[in-house]
Amino acid sequence: MSKLLVVDDSSVVRGIVVRVLREAGLGDDGIVEAASGVEALRRIGTDPTIGLVLSDVHMPGMNGIDFLRTLRERRTKSELPVLLLTSGDAQTLAASALADGANGWLQKPFTADSVRAACEPWLARSSR
């Protein structure tokens, strides 16, 4: 497996996501955090072991969609999967996010089971 990168401007939310990932049995190879899209891009550029990104959509400065678009200029969907986290209407976000290069999304609040179901297919691919 590869490291997971959790991107959210709220340290509290990042902590919740990390806790749920661990409850889901994920992140044994490491979980790293970023407080912004800019920080996430920097971490991705310096850590080739990151294999899956979970990013909030609503962040100040570089939001999750802008982060995703910038990342897709550098890495493809198959090279580095990204799941977007949203508290909004996931159906409205889905079409736009997928067109912009997201591999999927999770709607808050989520459970360990829903996180595992969303992440495992992408982690399996990154460990090949």
Image (tube, grey):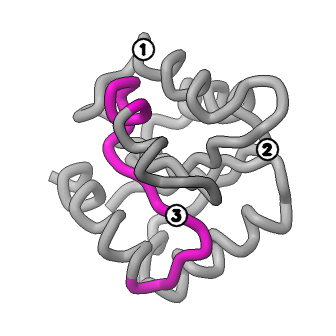
Q: Dot 2 lies on which element? A: loop
Which residue sits at x=64%, y=71%?
Answer: 18
Foreground of the two, 100 or 9: 100
Front position among marks 2 and 3 = 3
Residue 28: give x, y in percent of width and height: 46, 74
Q: Dot 3 lies on which element? A: strand
Work out how far the residue at label 1 is from the one at label 2, CA to CA, in angstroms: 20 Å
Q: Amino acid at mark 3?
A: Gln
Q: Where residue 35 is drawn, which disc sits there?
A: 2
Task: Provide the residue designation for mark 1.
Answer: 74
Residue 7: give x, y in percent of width and height: 66, 47
Work out how far the residue at label 2 is from the one at label 3, CA to CA, in angstroms: 19 Å
Range of residues picked out in magenta: 96-113
Residue 38 found in image quarter: top right
Q: Earlier in the sequence, mark 1 or mark 2?
A: 2
Residue 24: give x, y in percent of width and height: 45, 84
Label 2 environment density (alpha carbons within 10 Å; few <14, some 14–19, many ≥20): some
Work out how far the residue at label 1 is from the one at label 3, CA to CA, in angstroms: 26 Å
Which residue sits at x=32%, y=43%?
Answer: 103
Which residue sits at x=35%, y=36%?
Answer: 95
Vertical side of 37 occupied by 91: above or below? below
Task: Provide the residue designation for mark 3.
Answer: 107
